[in-house]
């Protein structure tokens, strides 16, 4: 090989390596160390979240979230991020949508589109008690209720990603991961519902989660209100409910459904951990005071009394990294109805 040819190839290789280093440097500038670009690993962990430059929502992420909210069919709402169905279904990495140059300027809709049979309405029949699940029809009612809770969570995470496109990158990625988890949960519940010969459209759909959106949207605490409402109230309560109904389905002989509840229970621990971690990071005025951070941000009418079920699971909350002071606060919280019906000492004001 001629010397001139060798020199040209060496020059080309050097140029190529320089380009690789340049691209890697840009990736690490925007996303943190390349080796951490895996689903579930924190991005740029060495940086304080307050110093993270905002990452405007990507065009593909914007369209993904709008599809969830603006299309009424289940297929559109449950199609995973980036249309990476095989990757998410197998548990492999799901690529993030590419960054954009400008944030979303169109606000999210106030309500999600729903096809006939999926429309939400106020209230819902009482959930069957755990001891009643020997009846397949009552198991179907339970599965439909939990499936719809997951569907609403999918929609609410999409709403939050559009509402606050400039949240820190780590939180944006965490919300997207949680959204993908909720899609999986919903599909798992729907699969069990189908095995029982039923469909989600055959059951009434409560608007309970979406009724909280006006309070979240009006809150001066912005994304902190969302973290307190969804992650630290509704999802924290689900730590109790999923454990109770996992055991109830198992006792009724429906082990396949019990396994679905177990999967959801495990993922909810991570979702509660995400909310607790970011509420703490975004609440410097409540440093080392998780109760104060929560009480300041949680929007009415949600409250600590709604962040639990009757069988209180302290171990799950500890696994989520909640402080003992916050766990005790939730454990002892009483609703306004409980306070109104509590016996009073003579002379005590109502």
Image: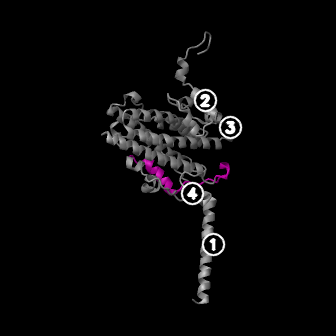
Task: Name the N-terminal-most of marks 3 and 1.
Answer: 1
Residue picked out by circle 4: 37
Residue picked out by circle 1: 18
C-alpha distance separating marks 1 and 2? 55 Å
The answer to whether residue 103 is above or below residue 11 is above
State the SS at label 2: helix
- Give x and y (percent) for residue 170: 59, 50
Task: Name the N-terminal-most of marks 2 and 4.
Answer: 4
Q: Is residue 107 visible?
A: no
Residue picked out by circle 3: 286
State the SS at label 4: loop
Task: Name the N-terminal-most of marks 4 and 3.
Answer: 4
Residue 34 occupies which quadrant of the picture? Answer: bottom right
Q: Which residues are magenta?
A: 45-72
Asked whether disc 2 touches disc 3, contact meaning CB atoms under 8 Å apart, the reply is no
Q: Residue drawn at (59%, 56%), measured in percent from left and top?
A: 36
Question: Which numbered marker is on residue 329?
Answer: 2
């Amino acid at each position: 090989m001629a010397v001139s040819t060798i020199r040209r190839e060496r020059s080309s290789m050097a140029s190529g390596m320089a380009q690789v280093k340049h691209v890697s440097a840009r990736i690490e500038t925007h996303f943190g160390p390349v080796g951490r670009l895996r689903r579930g690993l924190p991005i740029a962990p060495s940086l304080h979240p307050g110093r993270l430059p905002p990452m405007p929502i990507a065009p593909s992420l914007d369209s993904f979230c709008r599809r969830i909210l603006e299309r009424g069919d289940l297929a559109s709402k449950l199609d995973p991020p980036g249309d990476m169905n095989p990757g998410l279904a197998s548990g492999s990495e799901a690529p993030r949508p590419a960054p954009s140059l400008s944030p979303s300027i169109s606000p999210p809709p106030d309500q999600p589109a729903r096809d006939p049979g999926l429309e939400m309405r106020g209230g819902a029949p009482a959930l069957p008690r755990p001891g009643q699940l020997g009846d397949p029809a009552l198991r179907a009612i339970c599965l439909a209720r939990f499936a719809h809770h997951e569907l609403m969570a999918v929609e609410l995470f999409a709403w939050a990603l559009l509402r606050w496109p400039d949240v820190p990158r780590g939180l944006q990625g965490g919300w997207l991961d949680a959204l993908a988890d909720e899609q999986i949960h919903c599909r798992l519940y729907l699969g069990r519902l189908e095995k029982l010969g039923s469909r989600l459209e055959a059951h009434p759909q409560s608007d309970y989660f979406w009724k909280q959106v006006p309070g979240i949207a009006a809150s001066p605490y912005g994304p902190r209100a969302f973290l307190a409402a969804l992650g630290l109230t509704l999802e924290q309560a689900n730590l109790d409910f999923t454990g109770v109904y996992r055991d109830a389905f198992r006792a009724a002989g429906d082990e396949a459904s019990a396994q679905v509840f177990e999967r959801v229970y495990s993922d909810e621990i991570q979702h509660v951990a995400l909310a607790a971690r970011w509420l703490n990071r975004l609440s410097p005025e409540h440093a080392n005071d998780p109760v104060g951070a929560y009480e300041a941000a949680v929007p009415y009418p949600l409250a600590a009394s709604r962040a639990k079920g009757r069988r209180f699971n302290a171990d799950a909350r500890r696994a989520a990294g909640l402080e003992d002071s916050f766990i005790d606060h939730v454990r002892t919280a009483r609703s306004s109805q409980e306070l109104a019906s509590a016996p009073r000492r003579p002379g005590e004001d109502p």
